[in-house]
Amino acid sequence: MRSREAEGSTADSRTTRAQRRGRKPGLWPLLMVLAAVAVSALVFFATSAYRTWSQSADATRSINEATTLIERADTVVVAVDAVIGAEMSAEVASSAAQVAPRVAEAAGLLREAVQTIDEVSPSLDDGERRRASALGDAARARLDMLSQAPSILSATAKAATALPLATTAWSEALAADKTTKRAVAAYNKLTKTGVRESRRLNQRAAVQLAAARDGMSRAEQAFPEATFETYLAYLDARIELNRLSQRSDAAWLKGEFEKANTAIAAYNERDKRTVAQAKGLSASPAKVIADAYEAAATASTDEYYSARDRATQADARVRRF
């Protein structure tokens, strides 16, 4: 028989086991909460990672779009560079006039590219950010190039237009000088045949001088900054000499020798002043044009080539990525 004491002990044991069994179900809600927290954390980190990846992908696409903008602007940048680096000619004048209106549009594309790069750079990884930095430097350098382009293109167009006009005009003036010397030699024979030849040659010289005066005037209109005034004044003096020479021819052929001699005396006096004017001229109008171009464009050209060097260096960095 069990004693009451033993029975009491057994009862206590059953009670203790029952109490223990009663506490076990309380763990499940806690485990479920912990699981829910873990799932929530996974979802949060997954969402955050996706958002970061998405932002990075969007930023990369934006950098590619900025690259496209720079490439579009480069069609103008390259055209401008070709004009600025070319020798002066009528073709260069035409090219400068054609590309000048496109500079503002290209600059707008580059500014858009720079803004895009600046906005998305913080969302890029280190490698992409370095590439974006180089790309931004390339765009900014091109903007600096284009900021100097209008004044250079304007001076180039003017100089390139004026140069052939002035060169041809001066060739006509030199040809007139040779014709005039032949006329003087013919007149000095003091024969009807000689003076008639002088008249013919002086009339020819008058045409040549008129063409020279017209060409030089058009060159001045094309490039007002160039000092063509001395050439125009010299040509005006030459034209007046030609008129005196023709007056002498006409008087001599009419037998009005006193009038002829008076015209010749005035010719000789003015010819001295004209010779002095000629000594004050530059070797050719090309020198006048070059000096004016340098004054108008040197500062801008120096800035342009400095920016061009920066663009070249930035392009080299971009190519390394």
Image (cartoon, rainbow, N blue to C red):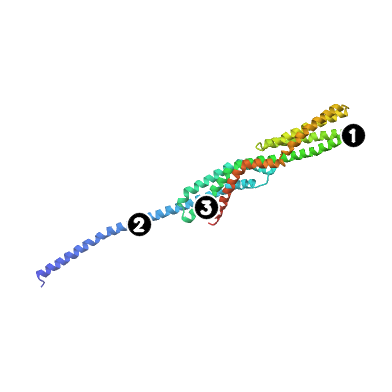
Q: Secondary structure at mark 3?
A: helix
The mark lying in front, picked from 3 and 1, is: 1
Name the spot of residue 257 as percent of width and height, x first: 87, 28
Note whether residue 31 is visible: yes
Residue visible at 53% across and 51% down in the picture: 135
Amino acid on which the number 3 mark rests in the picture = Ala
**Crowding near the residue tagged with mark 1, few <14, some 14–19, many ≥20 C-alpha atoms within 10 Å:** few
Of marks 2 and 3, the one in the foreground: 3
Q: CA distance from mark 2 to mark 1?
A: 121 Å
The quadrant in which residue 208 appears is: top right
Task: Compare residues 58 and 263 and report the one nearer the observer.
Answer: 263
Asked if labels 1 and 2 touch by Cβ distance under 8 angstroms, the answer is no
Placement of 277 over or under 49, stated as above or below:
above
Residue that extends furthest to the bottom in the rendered view of this protein? 1
Provide residue 207's location: percent of width, then percent of height.
79, 34
Tell me where residue 52 appears, x and y as whole percent.
43, 53
- Residue 217, position as x, y percentages in the image: 71, 35
Which quarter of the picture shows residue 20? bottom left
Question: What numbered label is drawn on residue 193?
Answer: 1
Please give the residue where the numbered disc 2 appears in the rendered image: 39
